[in-house]
Image (spheres, helix red, strand yellow):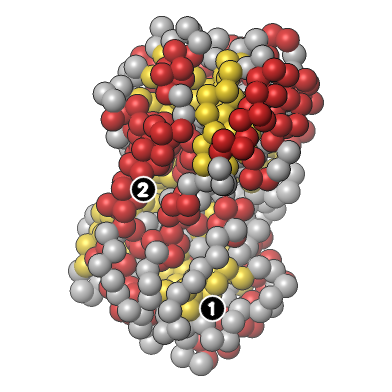
């Protein structure tokens, strides 16, 4: 049987995704064929896969850490929230429908078959599968029909390690409490625990580890100190994005990014955040866009029409119009590109009720929702200078109009995107532009920003290596391997 181990958490955002990424790199460096796996994820930050689907961005990073191509089977069920109570459901890389939270509970038994199929496929090609749970292992109110945590672990007899976050406080209670509420059969699968994000002298928590071991019967596998370079890696969700503060020199170009309710693929911003000549201002609802902004960047959206209305409700449409009148620049990526046009038409009700709404009118194009969702890696050149880039497209809808005569790029031989007549506004469906060093420098020059010698992709791999080194020092990896083999 292929080695397997599952990291579950005492709660959301305890660092499971980062730990899985680090462990993938660590064991891949030891010569194991490692695969990451997350049965169910909820995120609008998705990645296009090499096999033509989409998965959560965290699993794409974990695949990179393992040194393997992305696959839809690494995250067979992806929920992409479209409202406070409903999500688009993506199964093995393809959208199969939308469901409200209560309705989704009845879907789970059918989805388990896809989860087990994908897990089996990955197991067949791996020496070690490192599985990430979702949310909290202690959500016993959702245990019936569960496919994300203990339901999956029980179905596959995968041993579990529970992760607690000491940085948020109460880690002893959260670990012991998780054991207390678990069914006996579930608790029997837990082989150990990790305490994550410790700051200071870890020896001071030795007694805490002993207490958790005594109260739970689980083996302590390590105290993992806070890893400061985590902020250099792509954030899994918008909460992580908002929690990061940017600091830059006084002459840095200021990019204002409205944080809309269904913001998606916001890892487009990550390379910009590491440029010394750039400062990103993530503007929350209730605050105007800063007048000092040099650039307004509208990122992707999972619900473009609703997010456009939210933008208007916040008064940001007025701010953007003033910004443009004063000579400011605007970038629209994917959903943001659609918002920049004259209209967005949704006759089939792709995003809810059929409707047609006015856009911001900054470029002369119209978007019509419908057709097949485009999910693919892309290679192209920006125009007119033909600076190359690689990236991906992930969108539904077709955008046409007079300003398409001034395309932003040529992608695989086809003209793509649109640029305003004055050249200060452009929109594109291409994600990942700023991760390509040459293209990022070109766009920074267009913004009037200082450029640097940042090699973004090399930096990401270096951070993953440092993370693996970090875990090698602080996690009992031999015990973790023994657990994965059923010996722990």
The image shows residue 175, relative to residue 418, as above or below, that is above
Tell me which numbered mark, 2 or 1, is placed earlier along the sequence: 1
Q: Residue at x 62, y 35 (%)?
A: 205
Can you name the residue that lies furthest to the bottom here?
A: 326
Assess whether mark 1 and mark 2 are in contact (beta carbons under 8 angstroms): no
CA neighbours of label 1 inside 10 A, class few (<14), some (14 to 19), many (20+): some
- The disc at residue 89 is none
Local secondary structure at mark 1: loop
Circle 2 residue: 463
Of 474 and 387, which appears nearest the observer? 474
Q: Which x, y percent locates residue 201?
A: 56, 43
Local secondary structure at mark 2: helix
Q: Nearer the viewer, mark 2 or mark 1?
A: 2
The image shows residue 1, relative to residue 10, as above or below, that is above
Q: Which x, y percent locates residue 332?
A: 47, 68
Q: Residue at x 43, y 79 (%)?
A: 249
Q: Residue at x 41, y 34 (%)?
A: 473
Circle 1 residue: 361
Q: Is residue 145 visible?
A: no
Q: Residue 413: name its quadrant.
A: bottom left
The image shows residue 271, relative to residue 317, as above or below, that is above
Q: Which x, y percent locates residue 95?
A: 53, 37
For the residues marked 2 and 1, what is the alpha-carbon distance in whole angstroms? 41 Å
């Amino acid at each position: 049987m292929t080695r397997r181990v599952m990291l579950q958490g005492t709660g959301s955002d305890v660092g499971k995704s980062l730990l899985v990424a680090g462990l993938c790199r660590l064991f891949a460096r030891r010569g194991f064929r490692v695969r990451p796996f997350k049965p169910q994820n909820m995120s609008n930050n998705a990645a296009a896969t090499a096999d033509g689907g989409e998965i959560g961005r965290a699993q794409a990073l974990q695949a990179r850490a393992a040194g393997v191509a992305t696959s839809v089977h690494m995250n067979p069920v992806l929920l992409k929230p479209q409202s406070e109570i409903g999500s688009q459901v993506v199964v093995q890389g393809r959208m199969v429908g939308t469901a409200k939270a209560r309705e989704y509970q009845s879907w789970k038994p059918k989805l388990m078959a896809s989860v087990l199929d994908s897990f089996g496929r990955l197991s067949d090609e791996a020496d070690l599968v490192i599985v990430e749970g979702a949310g909290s292992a202690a959500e016993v109110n959702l245990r019936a029909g569960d496919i994300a945590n203990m339901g999956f672990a029980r179905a596959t007899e995968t041993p579990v390690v529970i992760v607690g976050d000491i940085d948020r406080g109460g880690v002893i209670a959260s670990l012991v409490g998780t054991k207390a509420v678990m069914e006996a059969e579930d608790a029997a699968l837990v082989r150990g625990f990790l305490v994550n994000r410790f700051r200071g002298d870890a020896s001071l928590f030795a007694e805490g580890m002993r207490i958790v071991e005594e109260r739970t019967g689980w083996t302590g596998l390590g105290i993992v100190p806070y890893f400061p370079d985590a902020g250099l890696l792509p954030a899994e969700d918008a909460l992580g994005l908002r929690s990061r503060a940017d600091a830059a020199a006084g002459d840095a170009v200021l990019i204002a990014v409205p944080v809309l309710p269904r913001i998606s693929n916001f890892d487009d911003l990550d390379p910009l955040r590491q440029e010394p000549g750039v400062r990103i201002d993530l503007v929350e609802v209730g605050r105007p866009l800063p007048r000092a902004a040099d650039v307004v960047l509208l990122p992707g959206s999972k619900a473009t029409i609703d997010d456009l209305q939210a933008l208007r409700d916040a008064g940001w449409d007025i701010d953007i119009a003033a910004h443009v009148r004063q000579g400011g620049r605007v970038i629209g990526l994917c959903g943001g590109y659609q918002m920049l046009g004259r209209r967005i038409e949704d006759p089939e009700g792709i995003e809810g009720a059929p409707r047609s709404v006015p856009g911001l009118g900054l470029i002369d194009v119209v978007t019509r929702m419908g057709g097949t969702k485009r999910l693919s890696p892309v290679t192209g050149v920006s125009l007119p200078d033909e600076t190359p880039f690689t990236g991906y497209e992930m969108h539904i809808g077709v955008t046409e109009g007079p300003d398409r005569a001034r395309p932003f790029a040529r992608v695989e031989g086809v003209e793509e995107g649109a640029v305003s007549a004055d050249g200060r506004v452009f929109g594109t469906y291409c994600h990942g532009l700023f991760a390509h060093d040459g293209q990022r420098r070109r766009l920074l020059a267009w913004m009037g920003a200082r450029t640097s010698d940042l090699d973004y992709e090399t930096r990401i791999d270096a951070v993953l290596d440092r993370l693996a080194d970090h875990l090698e020092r602080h996690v009992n990896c031999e015990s973790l391997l023994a657990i994965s083999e059923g010996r722990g």
